[in-house]
Image: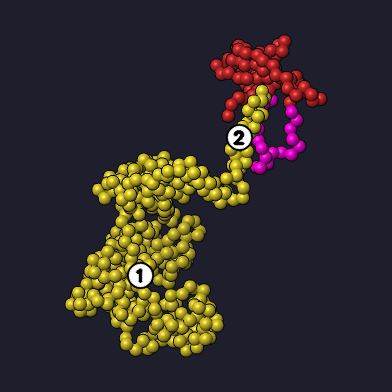
Amino acid sequence: MVKAARTAPGPRALLPLNRPKPLQVEAKSGWPIALHARGPARREVTAVDDVWRIEEEWWRDAPIVRTYFDVLLDDGRRATLFFDHGASCWYRQHYGT
Amino acid sequence: MQFACVFIDHLPVKAEVQRTPALAGRPVLLANGSGAHRVVVDASPLATGVIAGMPLSEALSLNKGAALVEPDPIHYRTLFGHVLDAIEALGADVEEEELGQAFVSLTGLELLHGGQDRLLAALLAAVPAHLTPCIGVGPNKFVATLAARQAPPGNVYHAPADLARFLMPLPIDLLPVPWQTVARLRGYGLQTLGNVAALSPSALSSQFGPEGKRIGDLVHGIDARPLTSRRHEEAITASMAFPDPVGTIGIVLTAMESLLAQAFANQRMRGRFARACTLEALIFRAPAWHRRMVFKEPLGDRARALTVIAHAIQNAPPPGPLEELRLTLSSITGEGGRQESLFRDARRQENLNEALRQLRTRLGGQPSIYHIREVEPWSRLPERRQALVPFSP
């Protein structure tokens, strides 16, 4: 992940859209099997439809390396998750505006 | 130039007694406000020692058996409006000074009615007898007002030719100036118009500025104010009374829908548009509620009018349960089309800028208004493709 700016974004700041949000994910062999979306609610991953990897800014000390998973949850909804290899954390990310 | 002042003393109380005959012969108090802050707005002459603005508790302690009535300003205004309509029907120019007081220009009307006496008799007859009007006649509005205060109920009083003699003994409370000015005059030991008339114009001007000059003129019977005729505005009214006070917004909106249907079904609204509306409501144990709305563009159908009114009511609902609701559509126009622009995009931008300007004024300072901009649309990281950028028109 790219580090956040030191100052909190004010009304005149430029606010990126679709910022990833940290998420608690249960994984097995690096693949998500369940996630805790809000509070204790647990949603099982019923299918992983797509997987892809992004490597960006390899010239930096901490390059961006993510593995994305397009998953189907047990309540029928879809979600896009990624594992940030630099921070060793899971995130959920929305696409589009 | 001759003016008549038509004065109906205690019009609210008289209107209530007419509506509820059981109140006749009893002291009646009309009080506004709630809890310990209720004040008397009008009282019948039978209520002793009560003046408008007095706390209700004090008025009740002076009049133990008094009947307490919640004021109904909508009814009083409607009633007085009918009185003014009847006077206008005589061919007179009428100016409404305040509730219960109006001026009529008599010049030129005497010939129409066969003399001033007949004209004044017609004026008295135009007012319902239960309102017992007093009519004062004088060379200007101020003198006519003072003459009306001297007239016995249901009669006419002509200001005498010797104005100085007429005005001198009258109290300074009758001057049409703010109460603070009257209090200051009293502070100087001035009790009557004669006391003030004895002062030099320069002394009055030095103490009260331009108002001092006006006071100096008035106490000498000089009043140059012209008569400003009533403005006639076509209006369509619909009203609804609720058997039980209604406090739910949903029911109020349903009632509003029904009133709008009633108003737009009126023959006079066919193919026409309203630019403004007034909502009035009697509130259970609270002062009447009044709200005027001017539409951004004339509205010709009830659905759009309901959307605008519902939005306004939801933002600022009435302060209590409603007993009666009244809707008046006004500024009615025959305009049936909208002016479109050839330069639609420029117009849209102008409208957007104007909306933002209003938003800034309303919210104060710099509200957080953004628009979405593509930053790195080619990026594989979704959070880098677009951003919210502060909007600057």
Residue B389 pos. (x, y %): 63, 38
Element under disc 2: strand
Tell me the quarter of the picture where residue B344 sits: top left
Can residue B243 be seen here? no
Query: Which chain letter matches label 1?
Result: B
Residue carrying label 1: B228
Q: Which residue is mark 2?
A: B373
Rendered-image quadrant of the C terminus of chain B:
top right
Whole-percent x and y of residue B210? 50, 78
Amino acid type indicated by mark 1: Thr
Q: Residue B311: image x %, image y %?
A: 45, 43
Residue positioned 51% across, 83% down in the render: B204
Q: Colour of chain A?
A: red
The magenta segment: A2-25
Q: Is residue B292 left or right of residue B79?
A: right
Disc 2 residue type? Arg
Q: Nearer the viewer, residue B30 or B61?
A: B30
Of the pair B388 and B378, the residue shown nearer to us: B378
Horizontal side of residue A82 vs B317, given as left or right: right
- Going from N to C along the chain, the mark reached first, 2 or 1, is 1
Residue at 48% x, 48% y is: B316
Write the residue at 79% across / 24% down.
Answer: A59
- For the point 46% across and 80% down, the residue is B215
**Residue B91 x/y as whole percent:** 24, 69
Q: Is residue B172 above or below residue B77?
A: below
Q: Secondary structure at mark 1?
A: loop
Res. A94 mark = none
